[in-house]
Image (tube, rainbow, N blue to C red):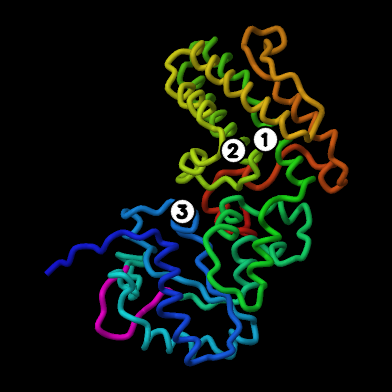
């Protein structure tokens, strides 16, 4: 007999209930005095607040992470797993705490009822080891270097600083999340300069492709520019941009983006070059004004203009690049090419989710 699914709860709320109603009482009883952090961070749509009932089909449910010091992890991990396996409740608010084992046919976790021990998803981790695995070795430094910051994927930064921490006895996880909340000022300026440079490299191609009869190429270039402008908006709003699946959803939550979003949608929907150029131009002016409002540089004229002697209307976005690079005082950034951080160099998901992985 198939039972109806319980009422949907956002995953972070389900994790909180798992901790407060089940895990914390067990730890208080069996391991009084144990210093740990309890959180739901890292991968998973619920960490960024985008989970829906559809999410329940894989890697979603009553999940939690317990972060320990290396000494306590070595001393207590085995006993903690055994405790939770034997004594966790079988469900939280109707959602099973047991996850079926991964198989070749089903390699991803899925909740399923059990009458026996619980194969739970309460991960027991060392804080620094987990941070390094998510973001690379610079994540545990008191002051990550510019190179460390540029190597950290924004999706991973969003996952580490998002979600929720329900308890933090040692304080190390909370301190790391605070350090990683946003880029240092000089890194931020450099990334903004590089994002404007990306726009400048292709803004004229929308018109040039159309001029030679390549409407498909013009549309593809416009779509690339739309994505670059969306990511530029995240930088201007001091928010980490998630990867493609959630980019539009997260963009819609940024403040003051309604008019900009309308221009970007219209540019994507346009079937002729003049319409495409007009809507992109509206977006360029909007973001140029937004850039000026940051006060990071002297104001730069946001008006459109021809692309040199050619008729295509562009922003000449490199003007904003030059204004920003003129404010760089950190030699570690000032002398770099305008290639930016890892997200500005590649959109390869397999690379961006494996910090430090070889690229060849």
What is the number of the mark on residue 298? none
User: How would you classify the magenta stretch by its main secondary structure?
Assistant: loop
User: In the image, which is nearer the foreground, mark 3 or mark 1?
Assistant: 3
Name the residue furthest left: 1
Q: Which mark is residue 231?
A: 2
Q: Which residue is mark 1?
A: 195
Report the front residue among 217 and 99. 99
Q: CA distance from mark 2 to mark 1?
A: 8 Å
Dots 2, 3 in contact, CB < 8 A: no
Can residue 114 be found in the magenta stretch? yes
2 and 1 marks in contact (CB < 8 Å): yes
* Residue 233 x, y percent position in the rendering: 61, 36
Measuring 35% from the left and 71% from the top, which residue is drawn there?
102
Q: Which residues are magenta?
A: 111-121
Q: Earlier in the sequence, mark 3 or mark 1?
A: 3
What residue lies at 49% left-to-right and 11% top-to-bottom? Answer: 213
Crowdedness of circle 1 by 10 Å Cα count: few (<14), some, many (20+)?
many
- Disc 3 element: loop
| Residue displayed at 67% across by 30% down | 290
């Amino acid at each position: 007999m198939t039972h109806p699914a319980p009422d949907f709860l956002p995953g972070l709320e389900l994790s909180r209930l798992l901790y407060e109603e089940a895990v914390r009482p067990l730890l208080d009883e069996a391991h009084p005095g144990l210093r740990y952090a309890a959180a739901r961070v890292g991968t998973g749509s619920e960490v960024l607040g985008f989970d829906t009932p559809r999410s329940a089909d894989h890697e979603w449910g009553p999940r939690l992470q317990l972060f320990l010091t290396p000494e306590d992890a070595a001393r207590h991990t085995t006993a903690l797993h055994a405790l939770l396996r034997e004594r966790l409740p079988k469900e939280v608010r109707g959602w099973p705490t047991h996850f079926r084992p991964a198989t070749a046919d089903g390699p991803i976790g899925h909740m399923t009822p059990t009458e026996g021990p619980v194969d739970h998803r309460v991960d027991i981790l060392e804080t620094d080891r987990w941070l390094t695995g998510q973001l690379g070795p610079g994540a545990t430094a008191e002051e990550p270097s510019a190179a460390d910051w540029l190597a950290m994927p924004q999706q991973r930064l969003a996952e580490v600083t998002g979600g929720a921490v329900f308890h933090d006895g040692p304080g190390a996880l909370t301190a790391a999340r605070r350090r990683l909340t946003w880029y240092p000022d000089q890194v931020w300026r450099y990334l903004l300069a590089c994002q404007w440079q990306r726009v400048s490299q292709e803004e004229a191609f929308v018109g040039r492709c159309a001029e030679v009869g390549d409407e498909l190429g013009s549309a593809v270039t416009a779509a690339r520019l739309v994505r670059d402008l969306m990511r530029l908006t995240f930088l201007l709003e001091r928010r980490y941009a998630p990867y493609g699946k959630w980019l539009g959803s997260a963009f819609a939550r940024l403040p003051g983006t309604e008019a900009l979003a309308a221009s970007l949608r219209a540019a994507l929907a346009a079937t002729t070059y003049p319409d495409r150029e007009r809507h992109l131009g509206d977006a360029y002016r909007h973001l140029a004004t937004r850039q000026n409002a940051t006060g990071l540089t002297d104001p730069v004229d946001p008006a459109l203009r021809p692309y040199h002697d050619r008729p295509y209307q562009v922003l000449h976005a490199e003007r904003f690049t030059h204004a920003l690079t003129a404010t760089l005082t950190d030699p570690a950034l000032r002398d770099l090419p305008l290639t930016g951080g890892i997200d500005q160099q590649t959109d390869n998901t397999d690379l961006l989710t494996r910090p430090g992985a070889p690229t060849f």
